[in-house]
């Protein structure tokens, strides 16, 4: 067959080198929430796998959900992850969920900077600074 006689097939266009800002933000939110959900679910499975008595004993389950038994410091969370404790995985999942809005603002700042939109860069920088300040003040208040 000559090349001119070959059947014409549709060829998918190559993805653009740069992705749209909406797609970047959408992917951040989507994969952030999925990561968080996965970690929380894995933590729950590990917890109930290691302690099946939680299924049958209300007292044991109440002990599990008591605030004093949850990891409170980052070092406790890391130690719990290393020792494969379910509560640590749940805590990491919650930390991922809490970080998603901050990451979204930081990503928006980067996008606005690339688009050279000075007004939105300034506004987004202020929002990001206030978020970081609130975390620092919350840490100072919470001890």
Image (tube, helix red, strand yellow):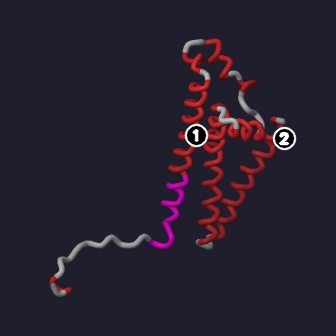
How many C-alpha atoms fall within 10 Å of the one at disc 1: few (<14), some, or many (≥20)? many
Q: Residue at x 63, y 54 (%)?
A: 103
Q: Residue at x 59, y 12 (%)?
A: 57
On the image, the x and y values in percent for residue 1 come to 15, 84
Q: Quadrant of residue 71?
A: top right
Say left or right for 90 vs 69. Answer: left
Q: Residue at x 64, y 12 (%)?
A: 59
Secondary structure type for disc 1: helix
Q: Is residue 92 magenta?
A: no
On the image, the x and y values in percent for residue 119 come to 65, 67
Locate the C terminus by quadrant: top right
Q: Residue at x 57, y 25 (%)?
A: 48
Q: Quadrant of residue 88?
A: top right
Bounds of the magenta segment: 16-28
Seen from the viewer's position, the closer of residues 117 and 88 is 88
- For marks 2 and 1, the one nearer the N-term is 1
Which residue is the site of mark 2? Answer: 140
Would you place residue 76 above or below residue 32 in this image? above
Secondary structure type for disc 2: helix
């Amino acid at each position: 067959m000559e090349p001119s006689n070959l059947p014409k097939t549709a060829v998918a266009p190559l993805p653009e080198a740069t992705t749209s800002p909406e797609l970047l933000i959408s992917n951040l939110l989507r994969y952030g929430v999925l990561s968080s959900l996965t970690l929380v679910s894995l933590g729950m499975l590990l917890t109930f796998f290691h302690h099946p008595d939680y299924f049958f004993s209300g007292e044991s389950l109440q002990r599990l959900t008591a605030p004093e038994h949850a990891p409170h410091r980052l070092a406790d969370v890391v130690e719990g992850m290393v020792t494969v404790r379910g509560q640590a995985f749940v805590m990491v999942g919650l930390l991922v969920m809490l970080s998603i809005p901050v990451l979204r603002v930081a990503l928006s700042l980067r996008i606005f900077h690339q688009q050279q939109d000075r007004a939105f860069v300034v506004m987004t920088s202020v929002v990001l600074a206030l978020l970081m300040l609130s975390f620092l003040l919350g840490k100072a208040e919470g001890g």
